[in-house]
Image (cartoon, grey):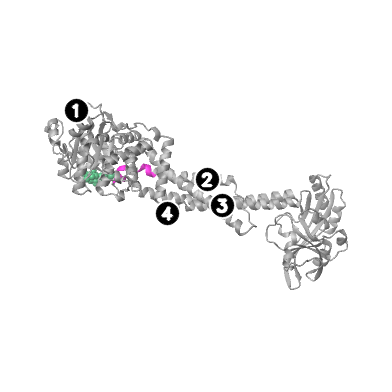
Amino acid sequence: MAGGACAARWGSDMAGSQRAGDALIRLRGLTRSYAAGEQQVTVLHGIDLDIRAGEMVAIVGTSGSGKSTLMNLIGCLDRPSTGSYHYAGQDVSAMDERARARLRRAHFGFIFQRYQLLADLDATGNVEVPAVYAGRAPSARRARAAELLARLGLAERAHHRPGELSGGQQQRVSVARALMNGGEVILADEPTGALDSRSGAELMALLHELNGQGHTIIIVTHDPEVAAQAGRIVEIRDGRILSDSGAPGGDAGDPGKRDRDQAPRPAAPAAEIAAATGPAAAPAPVPRDEGAFAGIGRWREAAAMAARALNAHRLRSFLTMLGIIIGIASVVSVVALGQGSQERVLENIASIGTNTITIRAGSGFGDRRSSAIRTLTAADAEALSREAFSASVSPEISSSQTAARGSVSTSVSMRGVGPAYFDVGAYRVTGGTTFGTAAVTRREQVAVLDASSVETFFPDGSDPVGQTVKIGKVPLRIIGTVEATGASFGPDTPRIFTPWTTAALRVTGASTLSSIAVRVADDTAMSDAEAQIDALILARHGTRDFFLQNSDTIRETITSTAATLTWLVSAIAVISLFVGGIGVMNIMLVSVTERTKEIGVRVAVGARRADIVAQFLTEAVMVCLLGGALGIALAFGIGQLVEGLQSDIRMSYSAMATGVAFLSSTLIGITFGYLPARRAARLDPVVALTRE
Ligand code: ADP
Ligand code: MG
């Protein structure tokens, strides 16, 4: 035990204003009843009790007589059913929750039978807790906690957790905690109940020492030996005061008697300590108002607490955030994938050229009947090429065919096209030449191969030009090879180009076209050309069995398709985030139940409801934000992986999507953390502390 000489600085800001003889604590007609089913069970029946500043009072009685109930009322943890309670002249029953929390924080220090230390915090951390709620700066409260622990002989144990301390040591830590904010009145409920006799005696000596310095000590016990050490004994039976050795008018009310009663103290007598240090050696003043703990400070403290709680249960925290991680990762990945493929397609379209209008059969992309419509003909192309607005006309016949060369036989996409097809810049000639007008007119059996066909039919790398490839039974002489200029998308089917006349006559055997591409003359506006083409084809066909396309309409189609898809998948991802949020709420609710005691302790040392809400809400938000961050990291990881594996898929991450992901995880945290936080704040501290 620490020496008495230095003990005075534990002292609180004693209520110096108390006139001698005035009761610090004045209870009149105090009752407390509980609703037990239909009935009311009255535990305290009209308690009248005055306790003066500086007294040491033992409350004794059999188990169930109402001692703890009385203690909790005095400590403002509980409210009386009827009757009045004045503390230092103030009417406590009239105070709101905040005011009572402030009273607890600034004036009372609780010592419990089972110590009630927070298992995740070391000794210093536990001692600090009351100062956190009092808004004292971290450095100041650290210093005071260290000092208190040192005075209690626990300097070596300052960084041990409760699990690593003996019962006696834990109880001394809880005494230090009670003194943190001053501890003007120390309420000890069966403080020696769980201690061996030696530790019990040491604790009693410590309490005497504190009493000697002016602390008012109220101790509940059923041990007559412990009770005998107090200056005054109040005996309770069945919720009534049976006897009070210090009641006014009683012999014990005589101060001389009190002094005589206090004489057989086992440790440093009060007078001695007081003489050695003087009452002026006051502790650091306790902030009476909320100070730094209101506003920003509260959230900073709550963030620190939340970080500690999450760190203490890492696996569970991780599992809690798993739903959020997966949800956020899928949102970000899907948006990136949609964005990436859209960019890619749009790049391809850009390479097609902007002054080309394509006429296709059917009512639009995806029209299933379009392949059955056989009205787009060579004659249409001829008619179009006679118009002034067309710089060139390129009919196209696309058809899936089997091509063979030697032993290689495979499915290819045959494209019957005009010479202008190669002018628009989608392909670059890599060998030989492409066909001209003459080849088209003469229906020459010539072919141009794209890179994929070259690879398929000439795997040995030999020069294809001059060789022959067969489409069906028709042999075609290869006159050139080309390579796509834009990045290709979709499966890379080999393509073989041949004059459209050749394709129509010799391969498909019909003169219907898949499409006609018209390159618009530079002096004609695109919209004019479009209107004229529309009118012309409509007149020729009699019905609208075709549609026009330019690069703008293709772009629009793709953009809107991609947007629809992104919305769809995002909706699924949002649902998964919602499920993740419910998971967080679920675990947080369990955690509140599990940490009932912690909440009780925090309230007992002066936390307000708002502080408890802040703590649990911050924890939920932190889980979600951390989950969000990990989810984003996972999404980027997936992107890296995909990029490494297959260059065909592009993922484009936007800062917007990332920001939205963060924002939504915060919102999820607030939304789904609110219910558990509110439940935590509504816990009755008395019930919370007694729950085993
Ligand atoms: P002691 O501390 O003297 O052993 P308590 O003050 O804890 O006794 O309890 C006194 C009586 O009040 C007991 O009979 C107990 O069952 C009852 N009691 C205490 N708390 C509650 C409660 N929250 N609801 C109903 N009864 C309670
Ligand atoms: Mg009790």
User: Residue 488 or 51: which is nearer the viewer?
Assistant: 488
* Earlier residue among tags 2 and 4: 4
Give the residue pinned by disc 3. 636
Q: Position of residue 391 (x, y in %)?
A: 84, 50
**Callout in the foreground (1, 4):** 4
N-terminal of the pair, mark 3 or mark 1, is 1
Q: State yes or no: discs 2 and 4 in contact (Cβ < 8 Å).
A: no
**Which of the labelled discs sits on residue 315, or is there none?**
4
In primary-sequence order, the first of circles 3 and 4 is: 4
Tag 3 secondary structure: helix
Q: CA distance from mark 3 to mark 4?
A: 23 Å
Q: CA distance from mark 1 to mark 2?
A: 62 Å
- Magenta segment includes 684: yes
Q: Are marks 3 and 1 in contact (CB under 8 Å)?
A: no
* Dot 1 or dot 4, earlier in sequence: 1
- Numbered badge on residue 21: 1
Q: Which residues are magenta?
A: 679-689
Residue that numbered label 2 is attached to = 662
Q: Amino acid at mark 3?
A: Phe
Q: Is mark 3 within 8 Å of ligand 1?
A: no
Residue 214: image x %, image y %?
A: 22, 33
Q: Nearer the viewer, residue 612 or 264?
A: 264
Q: Nearer the viewer, mark 3 or mark 2?
A: 3
